[in-house]
Amino acid sequence: MGIQTPNGFNLDNSGKRIVVDPVTRIEGHMRVEVNVDADNVIRNAVSTGTMWRGIEVILKNRDPRDAWAFTERICGVCTGTHALTSVRAVENALGITIPENANSIRNLMQLALQVHDHVVHFYHLHALDWVDVVSALSADPRATSTLVQSISSWPLSSPGYFKDLQTRLKKFVESGQLGPFKNGYWGSKAYKLPPEANLMAVAHYLEALDFQKEIVKIHTIFGGKNPHPNWLVGGVPCPINVDGTGAVGAINMERLNLICSIIDQLIQFNEQVYLPDVAAIGSFYKDWLYGAGLSGKSVLAYGDVPEHANDYSAKSLKLPRGAIINGNLSEVFPVDLANPDEIQEFVVHSWYKYPDETKGLHPWDGVTEPNFVLGANAKGTKTAIEQLDEAGKYSWIKAPRWRGHAMEVGPLARWVVGYAQNKAEFKDPVDKFLKDLNLPTSALFSTLGRTAARALESVWAGRQMRYFQDKLVANIKAGDSSTANVDKWKPESWPKEAKGVGFTEAPRGALAHWIRIKDTKIDNYQCVVPTTWNGSPRDPKGNIGAFEASLMNTPMVNPEQPLEILRTIHSFDPCLACSTHVMSPDGQEFAKVKIR
Amino acid sequence: MSKSSQNDRILVLGIGNILWADEGFGVRVVEEFHRRHAVPDNVTILDGGTQGLYLVNYLEEADRLIVFDAIDYGLEPGQLKLVRDDEVPRFTGAKKMSLHQTGFQEVISAADLLGRCPKHLVLIGCQPLDLEDWGGPLTQPVRDQIAPAIELACRILADWRIEVQQRGEPLVASERLLANDIDHLNYEMRPV
């Protein structure tokens, strides 16, 4: 009784339904429902999110030069990348060019964000899907030392170091009324690492926690005000004064040297800790190659990191741009974000209203009118949904499609595009990673592949930072200290009407903002974020989205402990609008599980 | 009451998402605190937004922390609550769906794990009325607590022997904590 989707999945919702719902103040913030068969294999997947697109309403009639400050607040993890996307959209609409130094500085900030996000994502969200913290307590520190020394030249590897760390961890777990790492599925059979590898990973969890603070300093230096860096339409807000010593906010040699040393450290951390850890952990999960979803079928990358200022053509972009459909890696299609026939958003299964919901709308013509109705077979009420009806509307996320295809975006999509384009800087590291693990190329299309692509990209981004830092310093030394172009700052110089699109590759995938400006104010603003692509619901033709596809056919060890679902969803580094930090006195669980 | 030495570094932090109605309470309080008051050099007033782990290094550099935030203690909407030291929740959630659920509890827990948590923690929380109105303003009961929350913080700072001064001249717009139309007044200019 299955339904075949056009994008190649056989859906069967007759089995037991499992609902995984993060407990937040907002109902169904991001939630996954699956049906499993008698063998506990996932045969139907439904993902929903509550990223109500209100930002578009807030921005109407505002000054386009301020839009970045609003979009920066959408989310605390993607802070800078939304701001960059926003200033690019305005520059594109108004034909504003930026100086070469501004391009290098923006690239450095964007790449620093990539590395920061990838490292933090892996160690502080995703590693705990693979690593059993409790098992680390029973590890032999000498065995951990031997393991670490066999995979890396990282200096923190003595038996004494791991013994101290283990003692500290024990004390910590035993101390608090709640303790850290609460609520894990510790002891589950889905965890496969030996204790010594678990201890290694926990040690690096702490080292990453300490190290991530250094990376952030790059944003403080270039963005001035932190933790919310300043951005500027027409360039970057930090002046360059190499001989200066005290000027507040100005970039001088001392600050450039500090950035240089942080780049050295992050390159070392990426290459001696992060990537070896992913490879080592991966070696114990070689038989867990689930989670491919759309990654081997349809992937999309807008590209980013322009070599030359103001050149956003595919040739100039160091992170690749392109679309692959139907699993045909021998053909990479060009992508045009301004073409009304390429990117369209559908709402037939989303809580919005269009005049004609069989058709999609290009974001420039996007409409964001809420329409919160549950499908006929949904269970519960609007304020306490027990079970969604995927035949009706079931998500606040719209369904963007590229020429009608559901696409995966993110590090793996970028690397698959680079690989298919035969670019050595993407292909060679992937081939080496897989060869070292004795895995075929097809293994790349998996949850593990998504996790590996992120680590490989972090290594790549660190090296690119070195490149753009050198380029920036050389340009300054050659006498160019320009960081902003204010020729068209004044609204009087703008046309009566204009439209533009700005894009980046956010850590978690392709991100773009489309803007329409009328009489110097924002007339329409639409953000299609990476999680809109990956977390999208079904479309009018029945194609399922990337999260949904990635869960299909995954066997679960124990449906009451949906570790496999979290592992795969986490591998996308999903983005939720940030509102969930509200403090409550008890350590609330972050995900509850119901089985019906 | 613990007394502050002149050398203690103090962080006055507001956290929350200004785009999401009462979620913005903490940020709006520090914004107003900073507009009204001048503080000595050893005190930092910071708009932390929803920055999660980005905030760890600010915590590490502080000996004492006052944080304003929306809290869920099951109180009446608009009720303030003062929570101190060990009573301030701290834990690392392992089962969260997304990094975007990194709460401030985890930021404290992370600083703790690194052995560099501020010695003194004060949470000044406000029970929200509405957290779901994307783009909405603070609701009236929560907005009414901005001034009392600032006064409470001033009393605590006085206990710590920190001299907080009312600004004589109004702070010019360019010196304020939030600019580019996201300051409290302009933000709540709801589009027509």
Image (cartoon, coloured by chain):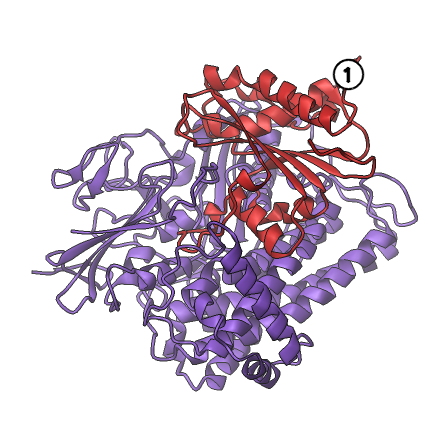
Chain colours: A purple, B red
Which residue is rendered at x = 66% and y = 26% of the image? A493
| Circle 1: residue type | Arg
Side (left or right) of B92 relative to A87: left
Q: Is residue A439 visible?
A: yes
Side (left or right) of A69 relative to A58: right
- Vertical placement of residue A584 versus A572, above or below: above
Where residue A486 sits, quadrant-wise, is: top right
Q: How many C-alpha atoms fall within 10 Å of the one at disc 1: few (<14), some, or many (≥20)?
A: few
Q: Quadrant of the N terminus of chain A?
A: bottom left
Which residue is rendered at x = 90% and y = 42% of the image? A246
Q: Chain of mark 1?
A: B
Which residue is rendered at x = 23% and y = 38% of the image? A385
- Vertical placement of residue B84 versus A268, above or below: above
- Vertical placement of residue A14 versus A89, above or below: below
Indicate the position of residue A358 as horizontal and vertical percent values.
Answer: 22, 41
Indicate the position of residue A581 as horizontal and vertical percent values.
Answer: 48, 40
* Foreground pick, A436 / A514: A436
Q: Is residue A423 visible?
A: no
Q: Which residue is mark 1?
A: B167
Which residue is rendered at x = 92% and y = 49% of the image? A243
Indicate the position of residue A507 as horizontal and vertical percent values.
Answer: 52, 55
